[in-house]
Amino acid sequence: MAIIDHEAELEKAGANVTGRFSSLMYFIRSYPLGAIGALIVLVFVLTAVFADFITAFDPTTTDSTASLAKPGGVHPLGADFMGRDMWSRIVYGARISLIVGIGSAALGSFFGVIIGLATGYIGGWFDLIMQRVIDIMQALPLLVMALLMAAALGPSLINTVIAISIPLIPQTARVIRANTLALREMPFIEASKAVGMSEWRIAVQHILPNTLAPLIVLGTAKLGSAILTEASLSFLGLGIPEPHPSWGRMLSESAAEYMRTAPWLVIFPGIAISLVVFGTNLLGDALRDILDPRQRA
Amino acid sequence: MTGYMIRRFLLMILTLVGMSLLIFVMLRIVPGNIVDILFDSAGFIDPEEKARLEAELGLNLPIMTQYWHWISGLLQGDLGYAYVSEKPAIDEILPRIPVTAKLAALALFFSVAFGVPLGVISAVKQDTWLDYVLRVISLSGLSLPSFWLGLLVLTAFVNWFGWIPIYTEKPDTLWKELWLLSIPAAAVGFRASALIMRLTRSSMLEVMRQDYIRTARAKGASEHTVNYDHALRNAVLPVITIIGIEAAFLIGGLIVTETVFNIPGVARFLVEAIQWRDYPIVQNLVMFIAFIVVFINFLVDMAYAILDPRIKYD
């Protein structure tokens, strides 16, 4: 298998990467923005995982005495009209965003890889037809496609994940296909054929691992757009249903009515969405520079 | 060249036909049609009444017959009747297009007016603090949801000026209308300009690595001449393709922004129609959006073929 050895490459470039810590320091020094992105994503994931330990209130419990409470005191970020604690809702909202983001990016990549690998490797008529299908899928904006799918499937957490994953398939399929086409002509694939390896084994064992780098880059970029699309869908009332605390949904509830009286209801969920998407974008850019230098912008 | 154009045109038609099938099937796998929704909200179900209403709306016909009715009607300019308003769908859709078109044009104007020059500056000053600042701004532009940006703008207006820049009734002059639309357009345009800026920057950097740029420097051309006369001219070409990507990108932004700013355009109408399962409106509107995106990409490819003499099509 011909996989680029990143450690060796880094060493050749003069980087001091003897231990784990020093390679981490090297990453931070060479990609300061990427390191910030990684930190944001790490905090986001930890928040989602340990939501139970860092909140004092249940995100769905209502409390009429705390209705529209100002930020501060027991409610550090205030409370909404029904007296639900904003901090808890945002922390548990991270869980929803993470599930939808990772779920749909993974699902979309999975089908994208299968289609890309199959079309690139098999070629011929199958490739021609699948390429047209992908053209068709790409003619609709991500949000419109997700809206249609969400409406078709009905509002639920799983359906939102599926609805967002489908418009993510075409680009992954395209990139993996292009990669497969290039790899198919490489000498090491020819060698595998010469020693009598089966086509299936060549595709899965030799081509697939070599498409990993562009896949990671794409997957990270898709994570951000999946989170953003979930927020938009929920904002439009076609995403995550009650009682799940979704950031986008929180904005659509609070939007018009409390803009003047309780602006914190508008500000905090938006900051949460923007920060997480910003973090994944920064990380995605850095990963692209490291793993896929040809795409470097 | 002519051969390429014809092939490209046929490909566009093929994509649109495939799109119509996809839209149609997606809308029909929905569990429950408008009749179910109406009866759900009414709270009782009389099977006879339900069957009568389904027959009236043609929902009991085989799916291929329904598809054929839609497509043959579409080609003759008959889009059917909206379920909710019971008016011809075309009368519901057409009057809403101008507002959205103005909003989209303004947003595109903002995104190009800011995106292209800032992208060029970022590339020319690569790896300086200015480049870093501009890159962080453009990345944050891609990270802010445009509906939240819209909400923030509205909140700021309400709290500071006690006035909401919301589209209530049709303004009397075009200028007034454009001024009113420029606020939501800036919200959509900010995100779109971030995309243009990133792509302009990478396209410019790509060109600046070319040999003829080094040659220009070697023969003693000034930094200004190299950057703007040699590099920018060639970097602008790929930026045209961006407009194709941008079209799809803008539409997503318009949907949420029209909802936030209460603008009576087609994008917001689509969301309402989807919520109501108003098939004639949804399928025609989505088809319209797909047509716009596919057609713009067709025009972009044509422009590219004409503008770039290095590419030979046969």
Image (spheres, coloured by chain):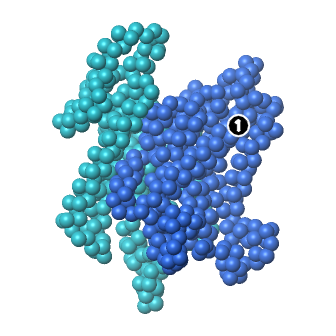
Who's blue, chain-wise?
Answer: A
- Seen at 50% across and 55% down, the residue is A114
User: Helix, strand or loop at disc 1?
Assistant: helix
Q: Quadrant of the N terminus of chain A?
A: bottom right
- Seen at 54% across and 52% down, the residue is A110
Q: Residue furthest bottom?
A: B219
**Residue carrying label 1:** A92
Picture coordinates of residue B183, whole percent (x, y): 46, 42
Residue A144: tell me if it is visible. Answer: yes
Instruction: Give chain B's shade.
Output: cyan
Q: Chain of mark 1?
A: A
Q: Which residue type carries mark 1?
A: Tyr
Q: Quadrant of residue B31?
A: top left
Position of B83 with respect to A193 (left or right) is left
Q: Nearer the viewer, residue A207 or B255?
A: A207
Picture coordinates of residue B280, whole percent (x, y): 31, 30
Position of B268 with respect to B15 (left or right) is right
Picture coordinates of residue A199, whole percent (x, y): 49, 66
